[in-house]
Image (cartoon, rainbow, N blue to C red):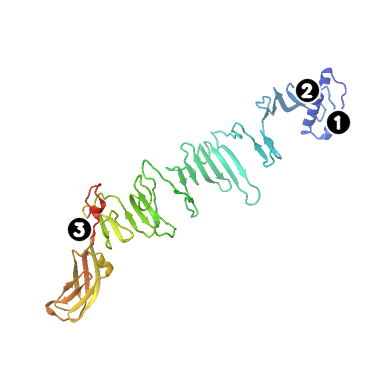
């Protein structure tokens, strides 16, 4: 090993601190054994601003990759822009702190008093800029957060989260309008576009508040439900055991909630429908049981069987109901009792019609006595035949005349009465 002892005067001005610094730095590049056999020589070369090093072959002092300029240190660059400017890759092993002492809880910790702690850049003309997270070992996954560029599979100008293992894009935000896609990289006409798979539901909301979901729209439907299956398009269920609770409440604007304050329609958990307000257009109100005293409500819990149907102006003012049956005439007479449920639907003011089909020869059949609950059948001419026959009963529904009223008509006066309209 060549050892140089004679040094020029300028070389003797090397301070002890510089020597110590070089010794520490050289420990990162060369084995300690090589450093221990080298002395400072005068036949090396160096540049201004360069941190020098000993060469292992000749013990010369030569330039290293570290450069210092005005208090800024560059590694791999001669124009450092910050206190430490590294051009090239870097590996950090162990707990590392940037901007603040490492707490020990994280391998890499960044303190950012100016808000931006970590900036990852990628060309907009390419895939974009991304950050990956990967768990190692069996079952480990790799996820990627990507600010997409022009050539990204998800399309440009989106924030995307992808499962690298499956290639599935699970979450996307479109920058132009902030639309969010779940399992969709191209949200449609809605701000939230959820695409489900494997039989999963779309959206589940669990809340302990007065309103779980609020839908508002100033230019169209607030809620639109579409279906392409035999199942119901809209299902409503109330799991409470309180029979007075509401199943659905349809309120007019600026109307307080509650069974006594709504201006609209209320369906309770028993299926009873209560409506308040006015009638407009042509409406038929039908009932399978008495509606009771005149009231502003079309039906109440006391009369749960009220039915409502809208009719076109070309439809008849009344609808017809009919029932069928068979009976036996014995010695020219038979008594028929109407089905009670059917009888309650017929208008007693208008009566009903009976048609016969004898199953054997006779002089003919007629109705001898008719009541709201049944009728008697007799053979014409005082005949006393015994035979089977079929009958058909047809009567007007216990309807109230269609309400051809203005929008301001009072609902109770226009449509509800304790007696059928004549």
Secondary structure at badge 2 equals loop
Q: Is residue 233 visible?
A: no
The quarter of the picture where the N terminus appears is: top right
In contact (CB < 8 Å): disc 1 and disc 3: no
Query: Which residue is denoted by mark 1 in the rendering?
Result: 37
Q: From where the camera sits, is residue 95 visible?
A: yes
Camera-nearest residue between 1 and 271: 271
Which residue, given by chain and number where applicable, does mark 2 sit on? 45
Question: Which of label 1 and label 2 is nearer to you?
Answer: 1
The reply, left or right, for residue 235 in relation to residue 410 is right
Which structural element holds mark 1? loop
Q: Position of residue 85 (x, y in %)?
A: 67, 29
> Which residue sits furthest top?
9
What residue is rendered at 84% in x and 17% in y? Answer: 9
Element at label 3 = loop
Residue carrying label 3? 421
Q: Position of residue 127 (x, y in %)?
A: 55, 37
At horizontal 21% and vertical 53% (from top left) the residue drawn is: 314
- CA gap, disc 2 and disc 3: 118 Å
Q: Point out the tag, 1 or 3, that comes first from the N-terminus.
A: 1
Q: Residues within 10 Å of mark 2 (few under 14, many from 20)?
A: few
Query: Residue 17 has which mark?
Result: none
Spot occupied by residue 242 in the image (x, y as percentages of width and height): 42, 59
Give the vertical position of 42 relative to 343 (above or below).
above
């Amino acid at each position: 090993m060549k050892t140089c002892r004679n040094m020029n005067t300028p070389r003797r001005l090397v301070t002890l601190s510089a020597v110590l610094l070089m010794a520490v730095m050289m420990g990162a590049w060369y084995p300690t054994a090589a450093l221990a056999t080298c002395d400072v020589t005068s036949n090396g070369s160096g540049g201004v601003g360069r941190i020098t090093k000993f060469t292992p072959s000749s013990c010369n002092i030569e330039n290293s990759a570290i450069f210092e300029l005005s208090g800024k240190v560059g590694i791999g660059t001669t124009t450092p822009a910050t206190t430490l400017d590294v051009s090239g890759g870097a590996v950090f092993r162990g707990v590392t702190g940037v901007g603040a002492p490492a707490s020990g809880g994280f391998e890499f910790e960044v303190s950012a008093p100016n808000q931006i702690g970590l900036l990852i850049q990628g060309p907009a003309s390419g895939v974009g800029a991304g950050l990956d997270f990967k768990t190692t070992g069996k079952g480990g996954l790799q996820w990627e957060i990507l600010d997409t560029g022009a050539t990204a599979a998800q399309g440009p100008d989106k924030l995307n989260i992808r499962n690298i293992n499956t290639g599935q894009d699970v979450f996307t935000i479109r920058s132009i309008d902030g639309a969010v896609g779940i399992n969709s990289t191209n949200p449609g006409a809605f701000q939230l576009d959820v695409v489900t798979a494997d039989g999963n539901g779309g959206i589940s909301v669990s809340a302990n508040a007065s309103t779980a979901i609020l839908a508002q729209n100033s230019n169209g439907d607030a809620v639109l439900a579409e279906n392409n299956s035999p199942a119901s398009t809209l299902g409503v269920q109330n799991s409470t055991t309180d029979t007075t609770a509401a199943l659905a409440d349809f309120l007019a604007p600026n109307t307080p909630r509650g069974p006594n304050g709504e201006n609209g329609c209320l369906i309770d958990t028993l299926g009873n429908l209560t409506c308040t307000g006015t009638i407009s257009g042509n409406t038929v109100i039908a009932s399978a049981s008495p509606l009771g005293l005149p009231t502003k409500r079309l039906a109440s819990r006391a009369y749960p069987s009220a039915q409502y149907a809208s009719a076109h102006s070309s439809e008849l003012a009344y609808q017809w109901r009919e029932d069928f049956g068979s009976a036996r005439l014995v010695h020219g007479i038979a008594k028929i009792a109407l089905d009670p449920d059917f009888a309650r639907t017929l208008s007693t003011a208008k009566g009903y019609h009976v048609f016969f089909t004898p199953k054997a020869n006779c002089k003919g059949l007629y109705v001898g006595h008719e009541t709201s609950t049944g009728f008697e059948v007799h053979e014409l001419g005082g005949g006393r035949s015994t035979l089977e026959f079929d009958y058909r009963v047809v009567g007007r529904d216990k309807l109230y005349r269609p309400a051809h009223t203005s929008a301001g008509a009072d609902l109770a006066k226009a449509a509800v009465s304790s007696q059928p309209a004549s």
